[in-house]
Every structure is written in structure tokens, then in C-alpha cells.
Image (cartoon, rainbow, N blue to C red):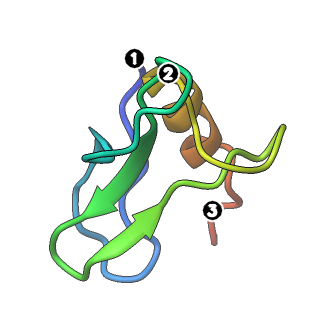
Amino acid sequence: MAELLPCPFCGGKVKVTNLAGTIHYGKKHWCVVCWDCCLFFAYDLTYGGLHTTKQGCADDWNKRVVAE
């Protein structure tokens, strides 16, 4: 998995983590969390809803526009 971009609000390090208690149809759901400012990102840009793969969540996180 590629290195994740930092939090856009505080610049903190983020982590892809499993959403506790969110197993639907046998699949876990994933989100990106910044524990410094409590940012929570879980929206699947392709299909809407929650990410069902860790890699998909990380890829969508890194697709966001980075301010210059």
C-alpha cells in the first residue's frame, strides 16, 4: 500500500483502520482516521457508501486534491 497523504486539516499522520462492528455481507468496512484532529474518512468515491477493501480506502484518500 502506498504511503498515505497527511491530514488536510492538521497535517497529522493518518491510518487506514477497520470500522469496528461494521461487517455486512461478510465484508469488513474501512476508513482513514487522523487521531490528532479526529478526522474520519470512509466514503467510497466510486460506489458511494463504505469501503470494503483497505486498499480501496487508501487509494481514494490519496486521490484528493492537494493544496499547493
The residue type indicated by label 2 comes to: Gln
* 26 versus 4 height, above or below: above
Q: Give the alpha-carbon distance from disc 1 to disc 3, as whole Å.
A: 19 Å
Location of residue 67 (image quadrant): bottom right
Q: Which residue is mark 1?
A: 1
Q: Residue at x 45, y 36 (%)?
A: 29
The residue positioned farthest toward the front in the image shown: 25
Q: Position of residue 51 (x, y in %)?
A: 58, 37
- Secondary structure of the residue carrying numbered label 3: loop
Location of residue 64 (image quadrant): bottom right
1 or 2: mark nearer the eye: 2
3 or 2: mark nearer the eye: 2
- Quadrant in which the C terminus appears: bottom right
Q: Earlier in the sequence, mark 1 or mark 3?
A: 1
CB-based contact (under 8 Å), mark 3 and mark 2: no
Q: Earlier in the sequence, mark 3 or mark 2?
A: 2
Q: Which residue is mark 2?
A: 55
- Quadrant in which the N terminus appears: top left
* 15 versus 66 height, above or below: above
Q: Which residue is mark 3?
A: 66
The residue type indicated by label 3 comes to: Val
Q: Report crowding for label 3: few under 14, some 14 to 19, many 20 or more residues within 10 A (C-alpha).
A: few
CB-based contact (under 8 Å), mark 1 and mark 3: no
